[in-house]
Amino acid sequence: MLITTLELDVGLAIVAAGGFSLGVWLRPQETAFKVRSAKAGRAGESRVAATLRLAGHSAIHDLTIRVAGKSHQLDHIVTGTNRLFVLETKNWRGRVKGYPSSRHWTLHRPNHSLIWTYSPLAQNAVHAAALSKLVRVPVTPLIVSAGYVELSAELESLITPLKDLPQRLDPPGTASHAIHAAFERLSALKAHPRQRSVAARHHDRTIARFNPRPTDTLFLASAVAVAALILLNHALF
């Protein structure tokens, strides 16, 4: 059955209007979700920072570094005896499933929603390699769970509950001269006036790459439908 020009016009108009209206309706909810997620992340990182402080560990929090033209945001850097630790904090709630070799894991939240997330193991391995290249000392990556999460059997040994974190680190105050020098260099980097702008640019690039807004897709679909409608009518008349 052939579709008439009028029917095609109506279909495109419905797509354009519907996509735009749905995007307008969803945008505030989408923004609110991102704000809640950011607050939860900061709360988890604050709990980790407090745990490290109470245990007597020297640590740098929320440092963005640039290595080989790429930026990396590091939640926490902690001194060890002959190494640094780089900690990636996750303040998840629910059940996490995945495999050590998987690039993506799934988070089953208490409200029964499902979220695909980039593997923090892969993420923090990249961070550790970049940090080691920058300061030229060994770096051990650790994933810390600051939330209330149930882990699949494959992941239990790979993620450290916050209460167990002090036992996974080297004793505080035992840093070698090389580790102390690397830590001082990173502390100076954290205090540099450009750190805030570097961190902001990294955040914007990360959001654009890994967390695109679904409503942007709806607005794009609406724009494409409008363009197709204009081109179709221009060709006919």
Image (cartoon, grey):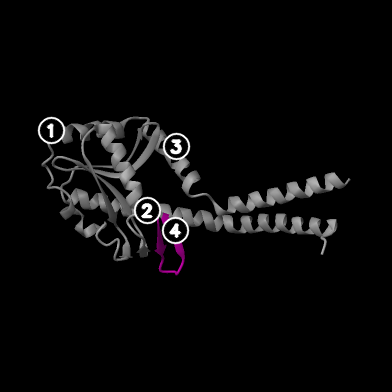
| Residue 109 belongs to the span the image colors magenta | yes
Most frequent secondary structure within the magenta stretch: strand
Q: CA distance from mark 2 to mark 3?
A: 22 Å
- Label 3 belongs to which residue? 201
Q: Earlier in the sequence, mark 2 or mark 3?
A: 2
Report the span colored magenta. Answer: 103-117
Q: CA distance from mark 2 to mark 4?
A: 9 Å
Callout in the foreground (4, 3): 4
Q: CA distance from mark 1 to mark 4?
A: 42 Å
- Label 4 belongs to which residue? 116
Q: What is the quadrant of the C terminus in the image?
A: top right
- Label 2 belongs to which residue? 119
Q: What is the quadrant of the N terminus in the image?
A: bottom right
- SS type, badge 4: strand
In depth, the one of 164 and 124 nearer the eye is 124
Callout in the foreground (2, 3): 2
Q: CA distance from mark 4 to mark 3?
A: 24 Å
Q: Earlier in the sequence, mark 2 or mark 1?
A: 2
Q: Tell me what residue is drawn at x 69 percent, y 59 percent.
A: 18
Among the 4 quarters of the image, the one containing residue 111:
bottom left
Q: Tell me what residue is drawn at x 27 percent, y 31 percent.
A: 188
Q: Amino acid at mark 2?
A: Ser
Up the image or down, 195 lies above or below 106; here it is above
Q: Please tell me the numbered disc located at residue 177.
A: 1
